[in-house]
Image (cartoon, rainbow, N blue to C red):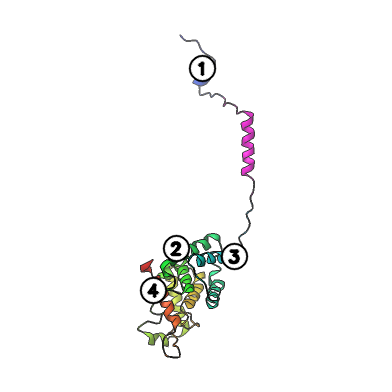
């Protein structure tokens, strides 16, 4: 019969051996790492000015990549769109880079065939408000002035048109706080529309009686980036 060895009784009754003590150098290393992890890092705040600078740089990069320049009128239109409607949505590096990344990726063969500012606005709607984007394509005859029911459009009051589009956008999933800005962008996209309602008014004829060139340009831009081609 084997004689009882020291520790046999403890192990048999659920006793445990004490854990081996870590070397002193390992203890010091662990304490050092814990101190590093607990150090607070205060990152600089990305403010309104930073966002504006990044937008400028991103726009310049797209223009250079596609060998484009902008006229004073185009810069004025873009400035209005940005300061009135886009600035509140392009506030983080991620949002800005995502938007201009889409612009750069989809512009391609459209260079020279579409109005660049219109393309920027349409790309923003497609990227950030897909419900509004699909809705505009579905009802494109109204803002482009190609509706077969232009008489009823002319007879409707501006506030009626605004209310109708507000309801449509809400049903399409546009957040309540963004509806007004989306309608404003639509008004910039189709400048021939009555600006009092921003959407849906009959096209303004030129002196020769034809629909303005701005109307034709906006229609071409919209058709070039329709849901069927994206």
Q: Nearer the viewer, mark 4 or mark 1?
A: 4
Farthest front residue?
67
Residue 24 shown left or right of residue 126 in the figure: right
Q: Residue at x 41, y 68 (%)?
A: 109
Q: Nearer the viewer, mark 1 or mark 2?
A: 2
What numbered label is drawn on residue 8? 1
Image spot of residue 90 (x, y percent): 54, 65
Element carrying mark 3: helix
Asked if residue 10 is positioned above or below residue 56 in the image, the reply reads above
Element carrying mark 4: helix
Q: Is residue 28 magenta?
A: yes
Classify the position of the C terminus by image quarter: bottom left
First reached walking from the N terminus: tag 4 or tag 3: 3
First reached walking from the N terminus: tag 1 or tag 2: 1
Q: What residue is shown with label 4?
A: 223
Residue 174, can we see it? Answer: no
Q: Between marks 4 and 3, how big is the CA–CA gap?
A: 31 Å
Q: What residue is shown with label 2?
A: 105
Do the residues bearing badges 1 and 2 touch, measured as CB atoms within 8 Å? no
Classify the position of the N terminus by image quarter: top left
Q: What residue is shown with label 3?
A: 53
Do the residues bearing badges 4 and 3 touch, measured as CB atoms within 8 Å? no
- Label count reads 4
Residue 98, can we see it? Answer: yes
Image spot of residue 56 (x, y percent): 57, 66
């Amino acid at each position: 019969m084997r004689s009882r060895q020291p520790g046999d009784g403890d192990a048999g009754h659920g006793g445990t051996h004490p854990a081996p003590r870590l070397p002193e150098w390992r203890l010091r290393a662990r304490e050092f790492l814990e101190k590093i992890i607990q150090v607070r890092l205060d990152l600089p705040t990305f403010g309104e000015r930073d966002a504006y600078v990044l937008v400028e740089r991103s726009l310049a990069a797209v223009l250079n990549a596609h060998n484009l320049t902008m006229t004073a009128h185009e810069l004025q239109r873009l400035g209005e769109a940005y300061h009135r409607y886009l600035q509140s949505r392009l506030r983080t590096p991620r949002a800005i880079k995502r938007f201009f990344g889409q612009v750069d990726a989809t512009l391609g063969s459209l260079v020279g065939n579409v109005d660049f500012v219109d393309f920027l606005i349409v790309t923003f709607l497609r990227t950030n408000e897909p419900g509004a984007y699909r809705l505009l394509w579905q009802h494109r005859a109204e803002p482009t002035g190609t509706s077969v029911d232009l008489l009823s459009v002319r007879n409707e009051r501006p506030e009626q048109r605004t209310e109708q589009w507000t309801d449509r956008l809400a049903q399409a999933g546009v957040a309540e706080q963004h509806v007004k800005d989306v309608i404003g962008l639509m008004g910039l996209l189709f400048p021939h529309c009555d600006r009092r309602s921003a959407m849906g008014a009959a096209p303004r004829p030129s002196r020769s009686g034809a629909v303005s060139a701005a109307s034709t340009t906006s229609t071409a831009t919209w058709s070039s980036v329709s849901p069927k081609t994206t």
